[in-house]
Amino acid sequence: MIEKGIYLGGFFAKNRIWRSATNDYRGNEDGTVSEEQLAIYETLAKDSIGVIVSGNFTVSIGGRIDDMQNALITTRQKEYAKTLVSLVHSYDKPFLAQLVHAGNKSKVLPMEKPPNVNSMEVMEIWQCMEHFAMSTQVAKKCGFDGVQIHLSHGYLLSDFLNPLVNKRKDSFGLQGDCLYLLEGLFHLIREYVGEDYPIFAKISSCIEGVSLEENKKMLQKVVENLDHLGVAGIELSGTNLSGYKKTDHLYYLDYLSECRPYTKVPLILTGGIRSLEESELALEKGADMVGFSRPFIRNHTFAKDLLEGATSQCISCNACYGLKEKGKKRCAFTAER
């Protein structure tokens, strides 16, 4: 089934392999795409991937994860991103831009404080949502086939969806079935790019520290809201990668079955999938695509090899997370940078 093509929000993916967004820490300090990143994406585009999702583009300089994170804000950043999109499209690959605000993980200037969901003024929240809308508009003008809004990994928007973090009592709190933040955000984005531009979402399957029952209710609420808002697809990820052993696989498979009854939009399962057998199992259980991140760092032809039945050489050691400086290898076990 993994070799079967699929239509996603107006474009066609030749197979069910989804390259999940991966921060490569290789951007230029002004937020533009670097020559090294062009080489990374050309390698990806040459592989047998169905859909490529970019590393996360910040929507605000104050919301950067690191000094080398790309941005989709200025005219200069847009021009460099256009070159990247043209390169990936030259290999006939659908290409999405992931958009994020790092929130309390933002690398801010000394004496500044990163935004906190409970202390943000309503006007600040709307301003942040407008930044997402404006960057989506830039992505569309660059030629990206769609965007993915990052609602996971403990970044700003995911904190609004975390009952352990969000204690607001106003409309941006978690009371009721309707998540006002998502409704406001997606309606605002639609005002900037129209109804037909594909918008995907990446969400956390599990929230550390909450009960299984509360997690299930919150997950279903998020999925139902996103389905109602007409997203093109939902990627299921998580926030607890460091909590898994090297022998663990299919981290979020059980959460897939909790989501499927509440939406008809395509679901992408990412996390701990390393073989063709595991990929097919995820598809049989209700996933429409299977996502991979670290395996593509370990092996530059991972998708091609997977389709031929090979198992990823990635051992999930997470050493790649520590190899952030430019010039260093991206995987501890490869000779290439």
Image: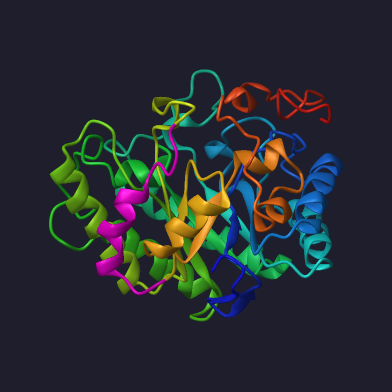
Image quadrant holding the N terminus, namely bottom right
Q: Can residue 121 be seen from the camera position used here?
A: no
Q: Position of residue 142 (x, y in %)?
A: 72, 65
Residue 83 lies left or right of residue 244; in this view the side is right
Q: Position of residue 30 (x, y in %)?
A: 75, 39
Determine which quarter of the picture holds residue 182. Answer: bottom left
Check the image and tell me how it is coloured: rainbow
Q: Residue at x 18, y 41 (%)?
A: 212
> Where's the C terminus, which quadrant?
top right
* 185, above or below 161, in the image: below
Residue in the image at 20% along x and 55% along y: 171
Residue 129 found in image quarter: bottom left
Magenta stretch in the rendered image? 248-265
Q: Nearer the viewer, residue 244 or 180?
A: 244
Left or right relative to 159: residue 214: left
Does 258 lie within the magenta span? yes
For the view shown, which residue lies furthest in the top direction?
110
Q: Identify the residue at image location x=47%, y=71%.
A: 232
